[in-house]
Amino acid sequence: LYVAALEDDCTRLTYLEILKDKRASTLTYFMARALSWFKQIYNFEFEKVLSDNGPEFKGSLDREHSFEMMCDQLEIKHIYTRPYRPQTNGKVEAFWKIIKNEFFYPNSFDSVKDLIYNLGNFLFEYNHLRRHGGLAYITPYEKLEKVTELLS
């Protein structure tokens, strides 16, 4: 099993799913669900997406790669991290550290269903209750409210 995440760079609002594999088609469908979730729940859309250079995100012929085709179709600019430079993806790397330390390491799960249920609770807490040092100790949802207010 794999955990996939889409995190908004500005607010740190995050969408998560447990996936059975990390093939390009699986990640493409994950991304479509994640983008739809952000639109339905928080009413915003992504203009850019940053990913690593893995084959699930990038093929030798990008125009024929399912993830690239989806980004093109939705007019989302796909940006890649620099190879061997995890700092390029620092905010998401920080998220992975948080989820490992605050969710996976301290918990055990009786089943995949139990894992998914608890991951949903963790995601709600992460987005709406957990204060983030990188956001001046407000929650991602509070950050979204501030940004929305500034743009109104």
Image: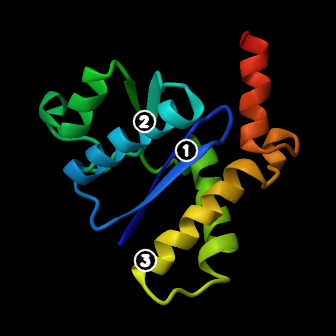
Query: Relative to the observer, which residue lies in front, 59 or 109?
Result: 109
Asked whether residue 67 is in view, the answer is: yes
Foreground label between 3 and 2:
3
Which secondary structure, mark 3?
helix
- Tell me, yes or no, if residue 81 can be seen here: no
The amino acid on which the numbered mark 3 sits, given as a three-letter code, is: Lys
Give, as a three-letter code, the residue at label 1.
Asn
Instruction: List the residue tagged with mark 3.
Output: 113
Q: Position of residue 65 (x, y in %)?
A: 17, 37
Question: What residue lies at 27% left-to-right and 44% top-to-bottom?
Answer: 28
Query: Between residues 125 and 138, which one lies in front from this camera angle?
Result: 125
In the image, taking residue 129 as reference, residue 55 lies left or right, namely left
What distance separates the C-alpha of mark 3 from that of mark 2?
Answer: 23 Å
Check the image and name the residue furthest to the top.
152
Q: Element under label 1?
A: helix
Q: Secondary structure at mark 2?
A: helix
Identify the image quadrant of the C terminus: top right
Q: What's the residue at 44%, 32% (across, down)?
A: 49
Residue bearing mark 1: 89
User: Vertically, is 19 above or below 6?
Assistant: below
Sequence-first disc among 3 and 2: 2
Q: Is residue 114 left or right of residue 54?
A: right
Residue identified by numbered label 2: 35
Residue pictured at 41% horizontal, 35% vertical = 36
Choose top left, top right, bottom left or bottom right for residue 9. Answer: top right
